[in-house]
């Protein structure tokens, strides 16, 4: 099938996808048996007696997240080893068989409650691969897995995300499982309709790596086949039918350009950038001095949150059940720098004008009103447009934040920013996509007037926000 530009422009996010995107920055917490065996992937034969954090404090996790400006937390409720952090009624391989809280604990409950108290959204990771359960590799296992989903989705309040990966190895009987993805999704949609289903799911796309690499052009409108990409990789471990190599791949650099989507069914399937603050996903004492630098975390933040994706950062608690002091310090530093950078919008109170606007409701002033529901757009059918900002006085700045009104679709394909230097308009920044958010960073300049020129777009472009900032001088770029 071929797409008109107007068709591509009018593909929009669901309410759950929009709510997820607005979280922007959230955490992964990898904690479990592996924390106590110093492994990344457990074998499933570990004794629950090993699980006994000495000073577990869910509120400490929440406060560390909040110090960095994080808005949500996803807990690894069950990893590949099959050990459950809640007292599941369907297996004994859980915290109820451990010495922690004398077998009466429910870590999922404590973390969910701490998130509610701290104002964080709460999400769950549940590994379909289970190296412990004897049912793995049979249809009975799929029913067991759905029962566990029901426990997690009915006992712990609102869930913003159910996060699946596509790992599919052998179980204790040497068998591999054919996952009932559609059945899993049905349970989630029934019990938590507001939750996005991520990675091996229809709502949120994996960026394609775990290193924090981001694309310069991260499109949210991509080929529909990408929804099955990670699942097909899992299935390809069972049988190589030769089809996988012919499909779009989540690791490809260009996923959403006009050429990339030509002739393919498309859908709104936005990206998440996930990486760990340390080399490993679970805590290892040997990595205490390998916490990512502030500069690297800032770089990933600006390129993910500021590149039309979200940022999922893993924070692995140690054997005490607390996030290590080195990680705590780095998260505080990250939050301090971000708050200092975005504290004072230099464009607030300024003037915005455009040669053309669709109508009074969508005039240029909408980009400065601080209301994410309002937006400027030119006349219908226009694919090229410009808007000029007057900050009312000269300011020094090095960061410009742009947002499209993505409820109306993702449309901008190429954008150029200039600043007025005396009587001369000078080049400042060029980018392709904007999407939910684009954070433009450059060497400091001093100016009063800016001009944004949309050189290419899909149908009628929109802008809901233009903000101007100066980052603190001690932030490395």
Image (cartoon, grey):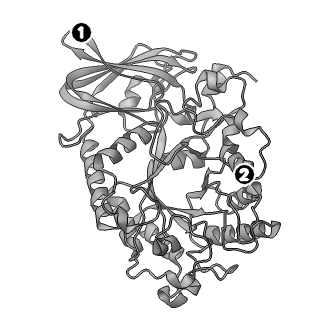
Q: Position of residue 358 (x, y in %)?
A: 50, 20
Q: Quadrant of the C terminus?
A: top left
Which type of secondary structure does the marked residue at label 1 adopt? strand
Which residue matches tag 2? 237
Residue at 57%, 82% (x, y): give it: 47
User: Taking the image as drawn, is residue 347 in sight?
Assistant: no
Between marks 2 and 1, how big is the CA–CA gap?
60 Å
Q: Quadrant of the N terminus?
A: top right
User: Taking the image as drawn, is residue 306 in sight?
Assistant: yes
In this view, the residue farthest toward the top is 423
Residue at 44%, 41% (x, y): give it: 304
**Tag 2 near tag 1, CB within 8 Å:** no
Q: Nearer the viewer, residue 456 or 193?
A: 456
Instruction: Give whichever of discs 2 and 1 has the lower sequence position.
Output: 2
Q: Position of residue 101 (x, y in %)?
A: 48, 87
Tell whether 463 sits left or right of 94: left
């Amino acid at each position: 099938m071929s797409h008109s530009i107007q068709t591509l422009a009018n593909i929009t996010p669901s309410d759950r996808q929009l709510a997820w995107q607005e979280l922007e920055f959230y955490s992964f917490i990898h904690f479990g048996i592996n924390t106590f065996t110093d492994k990344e992937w457990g074998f499933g034969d570990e004794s629950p007696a090993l699980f006994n954090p000495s000073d577990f404090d869910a509120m400490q996790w929440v406060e560390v997240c909040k110090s960095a400006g994080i808005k949500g937390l996803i807990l690894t409720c069950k990893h590949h080893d099959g050990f459950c952090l809640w007292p599941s009624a369907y297996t004994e391989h859980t915290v109820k068989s451990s010495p922690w809280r004398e077998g009466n604990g429910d870590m999922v409950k404590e973390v969910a409650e701490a998130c509610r108290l701290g104002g964080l959204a709460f999400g769950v990771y549940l590994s379909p691969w289970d190296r412990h359960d004897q049912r793995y590799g049979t249809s009975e296992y799929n029913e067991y897995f759905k029962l566990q989903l029901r426990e997690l989705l009915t006992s712990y309040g609102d869930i913003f995300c159910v996060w699946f990966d596509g790992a599919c190895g052998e179980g204790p009987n040497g068998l591999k499982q054919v996952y009932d993805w559609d059945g899993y999704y049905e349970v989630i949609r029934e019990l938590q309709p507001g939750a996005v289903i991520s990675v091996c799911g229809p709502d949120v796309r994996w960026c394609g790596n775990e290193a924090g690499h981001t694309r310069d052009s991260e499109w949210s409108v991509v080929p529909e086949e990408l929804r099955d990409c990670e699942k097909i990789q899992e299935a390809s471990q069972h049988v190589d039918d030769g089809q996988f190599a012919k499909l779009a791949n989540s690791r490809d650099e260009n996923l959403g350009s006009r050429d990339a989507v030509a002739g393919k069914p498309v859908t709104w399937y936005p990206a998440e950038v996930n990486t760990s603050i340390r080399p490993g996903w679970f805590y290892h004492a040997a990595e205490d001095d390998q916490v990512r630098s502030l500069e690297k975390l800032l770089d990933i933040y600006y390129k993910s949150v500021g590149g039309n994706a979200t940022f999922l950062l893993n924070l692995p608690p140690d054997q005490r059940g607390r996030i290590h002091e080195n990680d705590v310090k780095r998260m505080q530093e990250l939050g301090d720098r971000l708050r200092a950078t975005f504290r004072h919008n230099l464009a607030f109170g300024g003037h915005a004008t455009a040669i053309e606007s669709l109508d009074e409701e969508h005039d240029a002033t909408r980009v400065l009103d601080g209301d994410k529901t309002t937006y400027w757009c030119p006349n219908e059918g226009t694919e090229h447009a410009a808007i000029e900002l007057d900050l009312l006085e000269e300011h020094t700045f090095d960061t410009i934040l742009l947002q499209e009104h993505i409820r109306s679709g993702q449309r901008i394909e190429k954008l150029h920013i200039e600043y007025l230097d005396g009587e001369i308009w000078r080049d400042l920044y060029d980018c392709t996509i904007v999407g939910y958010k684009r954070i433009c960073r450059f060497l400091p300049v001093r100016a009063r007037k800016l001009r944004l020129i949309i050189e290419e777009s899909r149908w009628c472009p929109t802008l809901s926000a233009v903000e101007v900032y100066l980052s603190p001088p001690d932030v490395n770029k």
